[in-house]
Amino acid sequence: MKYFNHTLIGLAMMGIAVMACTDEYDCNLQIEKPEEVANNEYLASFDLLKSYINRDASSPFKFTANMSSTDFIKKDIGYSTILNNFDGIDIGGSFTPVNSLKEDGSYDFGGMQLVTDAAKEAGVTLYGGTLCSNQGQRAAYYNELIQPIIIPFVPEKGKTIICDFENDELGTAYGMTGGSQAVVENDPDGKSGKALHVGTDDNKAVYSHPKFNVKLPEGRKLGDYVNLTIDMRIVNSDGIYGAGMRVFINGQEFNVGTNADGLGCKPNTWNRGAIISLNSAKAPGFILPDEMKGLTEFELAVGSASGGAQYFLDNIVMNYELPGTGVTKIDFAQDELGKSYPMTNGNQAIIENDPEGSNKVLHVGTAATPCNRSYPKFTVKLQNGRTLGDYVGLSLDMYLIDGKGGWGDGMRVVINGQEFNSGQGPFGFGCEANKWGRDKIYITFLKEGETAGGGKIAIPNSMKDLTEIELAVGSGSGEWHAYIDNIRLHWKADDTIIEKTPEEKKGIFTEELNKWIGGMINAGGETVKVWNIVGEPLDKTMDANTFNWGEYLGDIEYARTAVKLARDTAKVDLNLFISNTFNQQDEMGQKADEMIALVKSWEADNVTKIDGYNIILHAVYSKDATIQKRNEEMITVLFDKLAQTGKPIRVSDLSMMVGNVDGNFIQTSKLTADERTAAANYMAFIMKEYRKTIAPDKQYGISISSMTETSTGNKVCPWTSGYNRNGMYEGIVEGLK
């Protein structure tokens, strides 16, 4: 690089001044120009940058500058500087899927069209941006496209008519709980056909209620029903108050918590559709016991508990609603005393009476020989229509004899021989020694891949479709001795989830990629002939705008797909480059090898063709001589590697910064003249290495990252913010020569 000596300039000007003075006058002329003025005059002596390019007519070399599309379209001083000094413009990352998105979900290619038209009008080369990258993507939108179809679970609802009396003969008698009879008569209002008359003027019902033999429809059980509805008409006020409404099931009496008046009845008026809940203690209603929920046939009675009741009943209906939850239960109540169950280590557990006298339970281990990581086994047929994947957990009651097995290594569940550790022992669930832990132990079932432990186990996907299993459960202890009861497998009918197949996802994202690539290429028209088909393939950044095309289109196929879409869309022959950023601190040779290997894998089909390599190069001049020597060596290695590919090579977004000995960047406003000179020399070195190493017919060009500096920035540029030349201008001149 050329340097000038300000001292020599000063001495020459001093001689001129002396010769111009006489004895009569005291000359106070400035004998040396200010350094800034001299520098400006020196830099102004250079010609326009592109005039220094040494190339023949066949050379593909283009010297360009990176500029945003919006700045270029303004056609201000930056625009004129481009036209005067450069062969074209590189719009770099001006357009990405995420910043080109419109509110309606489509893309806005208007900006690309505007810059294309402006470049065509100016007669300069326009380099397009990146067509396919994992970065800068509409990740949230793309992920939404492949969300599964969710069909919400809708409980099945229906009703079972117990009695409406329409098919009964007049005078048909129904038995009552008190031994008297209720008789079918015509509706006293003459509107609704037949009804059941309970009590008479002369013989009122005394704490007696009509009975009905109920056989539920096939597939229904009493536990499916949520309420009972009746039509009721109190005669005068006979029984409207009394001791309250009652419901009897197989002789067991339930108080619904209100009388007929509270149910909504008025004297001599039909109260239609009065509701009595079967699963709520809130009046009018009661909670159906668990032991009755499995009934399919039973005796039902309903009416007013009064010493002087008289009323009509009609349209006795039970309404069911399948809640989508339930249990598959093992409770030993029907087992004979002494029955044995096998255990996982070959021992046996025995049916005995509950030490607290509630029912039969399973005794595991003995005082002399407690269980050593051995668990009772059960063959379990899951509820019809349910698979293991529908089950959300397992619960059981446990009585720890003398506390043995309370700690151990956690409660274990064994399914078809595969053991799962919940990571929490019985004491951890709240059980105590010599006392029933009712509803204490609940082991949650997770899906495969979710974090187990803390009372949770993960059920493998390979088991989720099972309808019958061998189940074992117990404390993972070397001395477990306990009673267990009420083993329940809990199921829940979830929403129906219909996942998209890999083929469907591939089709969706191929179309989305085509929308972007096709739209950009069409906007570039015949003006833009060079694109970065794949950008930053080595970038492992994960953020909100990262989307991995290879996950759905294939690690290799996504690039092949992008190339095909681009070439099929274009109306002109395109040059498609792979583009990746190289930072000064990178192991550039290794990174180049990785990029070259990628291209080879894409081209292995002998159809896909990547035309060249685009290197986004962020260089740093280091004031540490050792580091700077390595920096220069890295540049040489990079260009050597790329030259060996035999493909066109382009350097884009070429930037320069200065780092101090501590590795920190120096702000441009704080750079010394020597530091600026060193940065310019390094820029010249990089450009000369490129021109020297890459074959002339493969030198596709260089693009400068920024034309102008900012006082607070770190990039050293050829112009100031006011478009006055900097020392970097000379460095670029030297690099172009």
Image (cartoon, rainbow, N blue to C red):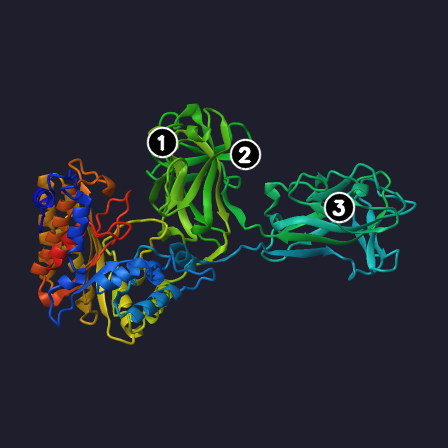
In what element is the residue under mark 3? strand
In the rendered image, which residue does mark 1 sit on?
Answer: 371
Q: Quadrant of residue 517?
A: bottom left
| Residue 696 percent location from the top left of the image | 9, 66
How far apart are the alpha carbons under marks 2 and 3?
31 Å
The amino acid type found where label 1 is placed reads Cys
Residue 555 appears anywhere in the view: no
Question: Which label is found at residue 359?
Answer: 2
Question: In the depicted view, which residue is nearer to us: 614 or 292?
Answer: 614
| Residue 719 percent location from the top left of the image | 23, 52
In what element is the residue under mark 1? loop
| Residue 426 percent location from the top left of the image | 42, 30
- Residue sitting farthest toward the bottom: 571
Q: Earlier in the sequence, mark 1 or mark 3?
A: 3
Q: Residue at x 13, y 42 (%)?
A: 31
Judge left or right: residue 178 versus residue 593: right
Q: Earlier in the sequence, mark 2 or mark 3?
A: 3
Q: Measured along the vertical axis of the image, is residue 377 above or below residue 103?
A: above
Question: In the depicted view, which residue is nearer to us: 141 or 354?
Answer: 141
In the rendered image, which residue does mark 3 sit on?
Answer: 302
